[in-house]
Amino acid sequence: MKIGEVLRKVFLVDLLKGMAVTFRHQHPKEVVTEQYPLQRPDVAERFRGMPKLLKTEDGKDLCTACGACALVCPEKLIKVGSVRDPETKKKILTDFDFDIGRCLFCGLCEEACPPECLDLTQTYEIGLYSREGTVLNRQQLEDGVPRKVYEK
Amino acid sequence: MSDEPFYESLEEVEPGKTFLDSREMVLNMGPQHPSTHGVLRVVLKLDGEKVNGLECIVGYLHRGIEKLGENRTWINYAPFVDRLDYTAAISNNLGYCLAVEKLMGLEIPKRAQHLRVILTELCRLAAHQLWLGTHVLDVGAVTPLFYAFRDRETILDVFEKYCGARLTTHSFRIGGCRWDAYEGFSQHVLKVCDDLETKLRDYADLITGNRIWKQRTKGVGKLTAEDCINYAITGPVLRASGVKWDVRKAQPYCSYDEFDFDIPIGTEGDTYDRYLVRVAEMRQSIRIVRQATEGLAEGPIMARVAKVLRPPPGEAYVSIEAPKGELGYFVVSDGSPSAYRVRVRPPSFIHLQALEKMCKGGLVADVVANIGTLDIVLGEVDR
Amino acid sequence: MNGFLQYLSSNVTPGEAGNLPWVVIYVLLIFTGISIGVIFMNWFERKVMARMQVRLGPMRVGPLGMLQPVADAIKLLLKEDLVPEKADRLVFWFAPVWVTMTAFTSFIVVPFGRTHAVTDMNIGVLFMLGVSSLGVLGVIMAGWASNSNYSLMGSLRSGAQMVSYEIAMSLAVISAVLMTSRGTGTGTLSMIGIVEAQMQQQTWFAFSLFPVGLIALVIFSISMVAETNRAPFDLPEAESELVAGFMTEYSGFRWSLFFLAEYAAMMAVSAIATTLWLGGWLRPFPNLLSGPAWDTAFSLVPGLTFLALGGLCFWAYRGMPRIALRNEARGLAGFGAFLAGVGLLMLLPGIRMRVQDIFWFILKIGFFMYLYVWYRTTFPRYRFDQLMRLGWKVLLPISLAVVIVSAFIGVRHELVALFWR
């Protein structure tokens, strides 16, 4: 063995180098923790979170009740109810059930929607205390989930 | 496999003998254990501390993913494939899309191929970072886990900005990519590469040169090249034993032949070499990502495909170089919108065969290191 | 009462003075001090480990997580007390008691200052080493009484490890004790005597006979980590191993006694290391920077340190979100005020002279505690056979060589006189 190697072994150089790495990481700027309720992360624009039914600016439904989202969903958890308007022969949306308990958040429904009104928003705080609230109805989907401000 | 049970009750074998008289003890490293990387059950036959025999019992995470393919359409099924090797969802997605595209004979635009390469290599980096953190944690060092996950977070930020999810990404579609590169994609990705290269030096100081690490991993879990080929082992485990086989170079797919990268090879085939091979692979992945980002082609990102896919009847097999090994997809179509059969060749399941050979004759404390070095993910093993 | 207060102006320990009331007071003070030390170590370890792992550590329970050890203690006290069915009840009860007793008893001779020890035995170091070796018996009792195969294996491995590394430890201690005789010609095993020998030889033993003292210190600091079953030698109690160690069957208060004993043993061996090699209660540079001016300057350091700590608390208080964490912020400000008050108290001349020895001693023990946490964060674990090989085949020969060399250098004048008349 070469003399350099022997000296490095005897003086525990490799162990000291490792200790230097951990020592260096103690600097406060290295901390990556986000303290959750006080600091909430901002997620990307394309984030697939809580679904929401969008409306036009006037408040009219964008949804044409075509049922493309229900067809494409891997879990078959969207149920679109509609009636046909006798004059215009177009479908009008009556109810829309979305079972968020079984949702994969895959984004296929968002992709398949022709008028682009089913949007997976950036809300990620959708926890519930019981299973009853997992099936969202049309009203909940249109209102969305308000973002809670943390209070002590 | 013989018909006799692997372990029997001691009273049946040697009546009258007490537990301490016997030489062999059966130890069950049960499904719930901090180090089995999921719900893996390992039954060990021990003589003191020496391992005489080992049996893996899998199936605790079986979710019927292959069967689900027969009840979903080709497009619907893609989110489920993410859940196989859940540490590297993008690779699984790529394999499935390539298999169906081969079945349909589709030509993918160049820009889509480059985007796929960038994301897949970033995914390889993320999966190797996770492997690094958990493997080193099993052997005893607690800090590299946090450094690895911190670095993995920077990559997951790219995924989040690109496709909206961090873990089960569902990023590609059959025919190309659904999303184009977002605003500032190239700068973000290049910055991630630069940061990662600096951080990889920390691991060299903290782990690679450390004498305790070397003592724990050198000579442990040796697999010769012949063993690997006999057991159908692929991926970094095979390369660490000295066989120069990488699917990206041997059977290039998805424009990998346009990029210039090396294949790191080991010599001994022990745990230390597998560690070195994976770390070197990380550096090569960074090289590929840089080349692909700087040479990102222009053009469409999706080929023309119908809304309801009906591939012509037939079968196709595509294998890709996933972070864990060679991941293969065998798809059979009978002309309908649903698959007739989807079969996944999971690298982790096949690697588990070699666990007995690696652990036999070694000590109990090395079993955990061996499971970690094979880099198994139970989602893939049990599907 | 007069005799009681008269002791305050003496310059010997209460044990030497034969002053029973003060002995009792010192014993209670040491007991309280060790307990506070263990509580502080719990918080300190979690915070330092977290910072080295780029995260924050406990932050929610009190301001900056300072009440976390209290919460842990309450949780442990409220846990169900499980005794395995076929366990040996008496031994099961006795094992944690034994371990705690030996860990605390060894603190009788630890000198925090010239007069700040319970007593000064003339076999002080030997007493400390002997009593901490008795702790091994408690470990084995715990494994045996649990009536569980894996606990027994774990405790036997633990016991074997502790015994193996005690030899290297003791040899390193012998080499330090040999060095006490360099000035006067007679050595001493008494802890206070060793520190006074360092004072008289005008150098800490870590730097005397360079590099022999330093090598002995390094050997001791590696052996003491193995002796107390801490990383990188913590295979018997590692979480990711199969054999979960002798503490598996213990829950609640019994486990907390083991925990207390482990940290107290860590502090005890750190105290030995401090006394033998780092000059005990002596302030830094007692000879290079000597004289009454420097003495006064150094004696101001404890008070100023506490004032600085109080200032740090206030600075952190300013950075805290005041509305969401109202009570934590007030608690932190209050704690900062308390520390600053203690600091001001320590600047008073009468108290200053007495307290500074204790401060330097505790600072040096704190350095070794930091080393413990640093080792745990950085290194992977040794496998058991590698651990034993290290103890017997590496550390034992080196420490034997160190003893021989320090003995040889000590008697070289006599040898020269003998052979080259």
Image (spheres, rainbow, N blue to C red):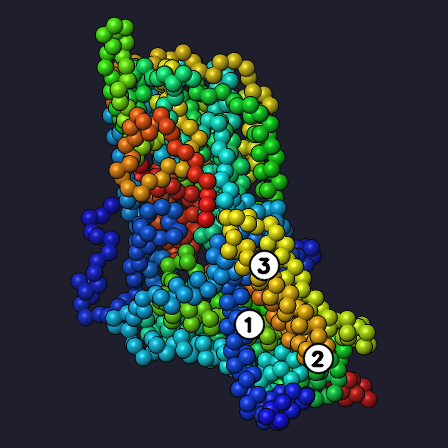
Q: Chain of mark 2?
A: C
Question: Can residue C399 be seen in this snapshot?
Answer: no
Residue of label 1? C267
Q: Up-down: is C38 above or below B135?
A: below
**Residue B44 place in picture, x, y as percent:** 32, 55
Density class for disc 1 (Cα within 10 Å; few <14, some 14-19, many ≥20) is: many
Name the one closer to the observer, C39 or C176. Answer: C39
Disc 3 marks a residue whose amino acid type is Ala
| Lower sequence index among marks 1 and 2 | 1
Say left or right for C49 vs C202.
Answer: left
**Quadrant location, the C terminus of chain C:** bottom right
Q: Residue at x 57, y 47 (%)?
A: A31
| SS under mark 3 | helix
**Residue B28 place in picture, x, y as percent:** 30, 56
Measured in 3D between alpha carbons, the distance from the residue under mark 3 to the one under mark 1, in whole angstroms, is 30 Å
Residue of label 3? C333
Give the numbered dot on residue C350.
Answer: 2
Please tell me in which quadrant of the rendered image residue B106 appears: top left
